[in-house]
Image: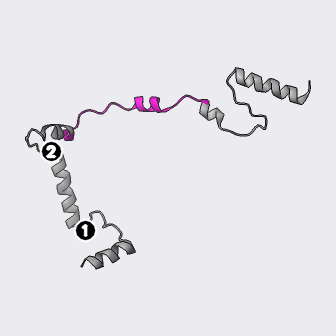
């Protein structure tokens, strides 16, 4: 059989069986694209998120009820203590444009 006839046969075969026709044998990544998606399996690995205290706070806020989150209060207090010791997060770096606009405002 001639080469063009073989190519036509392979092209038809690829069309019938839903394969990619790649006579130049280029690396197209089809092997990766044919694999099953990993997202659903990875998502199923982690447990479902339960209701947090913040969700309850947001639910009761429109009703006018106040809530107290002791863990959040402790976290904020620890941040304040760290700031007083000089261990807080650093200030944002200012760019030249920001420093010019700050001087104009004064």
User: Residue 68 lies in what quarter of the image?
Assistant: top left
User: Residue 79 lies in what quarter of the image?
Assistant: bottom left
Give the magenta part as a residue range. 34-54
Residue under label 1, please give it: 86
Secondary element type, mark 1: loop
In magenta stretch: residue 102: no
The one of 73 and 59 positioned closer to us in this rendering: 59
Tell me which residue sits at (79%, 25%) in the image: 10
| Drawn side of residue 57 relative to residue 50, left or right | left
Q: Where is residue 42 in the image (x, y as percent from the top left)?
A: 45, 32
Residue under label 2, please give it: 69
Q: Which mark is residue 20?
A: none
Tell me which residue sits at (16%, 37%) in the image: 59
User: Residue 12 lies in what quarter of the image?
Assistant: top right
Q: In which quarter of the image is the C terminus?
A: bottom left
Which marked residue is nearer to the observer: mark 1 or mark 2?
Answer: 2
In magenta stretch: residue 51: yes
Q: 10 Å neighbourhood of mark 1: few (<14), some, or many (≥20)?
A: few
Q: Position of residue 83 (x, y in %)?
A: 22, 64
Q: 10 Å neighbourhood of mark 2: few (<14), some, or many (≥20)?
A: few
Q: Which of marks 1 and 2 is nearer the N terminus?
A: 2
Tell me which residue sits at (27%, 65%) in the image: 87
The one of 81 and 26 positioned closer to us in this rendering: 26
| Drawn side of residue 79 relative to residue 94, left or right | left
Above/below status of 28 relative to 36 = below
Q: Where is residue 72 in the image (x, y as percent from the top left)?
A: 18, 48
The one of 99 and 5 positioned closer to us in this rendering: 5
Residue at mark 1 to residue at mark 2: CA–CA distance = 26 Å
| Drawn side of residue 23 relative to residue 28, left or right | right
Secondary element type, mark 2: loop
């Amino acid at each position: 059989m001639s080469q063009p006839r073989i190519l036509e046969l392979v092209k038809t075969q690829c069309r019938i069986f839903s394969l990619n026709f790649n006579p130049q044998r280029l690396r197209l990544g089809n092997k990766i694209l044919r694999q099953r998606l990993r997202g659903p399996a990875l998502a199923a690995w982690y447990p479902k998120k339960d209701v947090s205290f913040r969700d309850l706070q947001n639910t009761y806020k429109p009703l006018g009820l106040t809530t107290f989150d002791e863990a959040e209060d402790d976290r904020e207090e620890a941040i304040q203590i760290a700031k007083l010791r000089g261990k807080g997060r650093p200030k944002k770096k200012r760019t030249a444009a920001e420093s010019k606009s700050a001087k104009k405002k004064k």
